[in-house]
Image: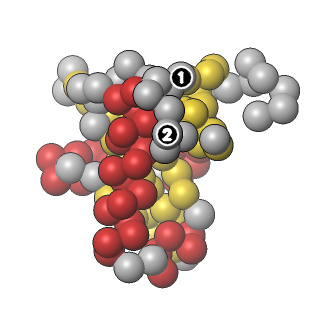
Amino acid sequence: MYKTRIAIFSHQGRKIIVVPLDCSFEARPPWQRNDALKRIQKSATKSGLANTPVAVVWKVGGKLHCLAPDEWHEFLLSLTWNVIIENLSLALACHEESKTGHIDREGSHPDD
């Protein structure tokens, strides 16, 4: 099991989970990117966030990239990398075999 840091943003009354990734994500083929997004969405669903869409974002040079539902692209690309990083306040547990998941508040576990 690993944990990934997440931020939850609200826009027009809806929420989205945003997961920042390393710039190396850019080099992955589209099928690997989509698979990563699906696995994170599955972990979010197991953690009780079933109706909350997930987006992954990464920065290459000074440009923000995202993989998200189409209706979220404009909002996500209006954010800056620093705003996303400043809003990381939760950690999502990701584990393939687990039937349940959980979310920790950042800083709640010193060994995370």
**What residue would you read off at disc 2?**
97
Residues marked 1 and 2 touching at CB (< 8 Å): no
Q: Residue at x 29, y 26 (%)?
A: 50
Camera-nearest residue between 1 and 69: 1
Q: Is residue 111 visible?
A: yes
For the residues marked 1 and 2, what is the alpha-carbon distance in whole angstroms? 14 Å
Give coordinates of residue 105: x percent, y percent: 63, 20
Q: Residue at x 50, y 32 (%)?
A: 98
Q: Residues within 10 Å of mark 2 (few under 14, many from 20)?
A: few
Marks 1 and 2, the one that precedes in the sequence: 2
Q: Quadrant of the C terminus?
A: top right
User: In the rendering, which numbered label is found on residue 75?
Assistant: none
Q: Amino acid at mark 1?
A: His
Looking at the image, residue 86 sits to the left or right of residue 73; the answer is right
Q: Say which of marks 1 and 2 sits in front.
A: 2
Q: Residue at x 48, y 81 (%)?
A: 27
Q: Amino acid at mark 2?
A: Glu
Seen as rendered, the residue at the extreme front is: 97
Q: Residues within 10 Å of mark 1 (few under 14, many from 20)?
A: some
Give coordinates of residue 10: x percent, y percent: 32, 26
Image: 25 above or below 50: below
Q: How many marks?
A: 2
**What residue would you read off at disc 1?**
102
Q: Residue at x 27, y 45 (%)?
A: 75
Give coordinates of residue 49: x percent, y percent: 35, 24
Camera-nearest residue between 71 and 92: 92
Place residue 66 in its image quadrant: bottom left
Image: 60 above or below 47: below
Q: Tag 2, which secondary structure?
A: loop
Q: Tag 1, which secondary structure?
A: loop
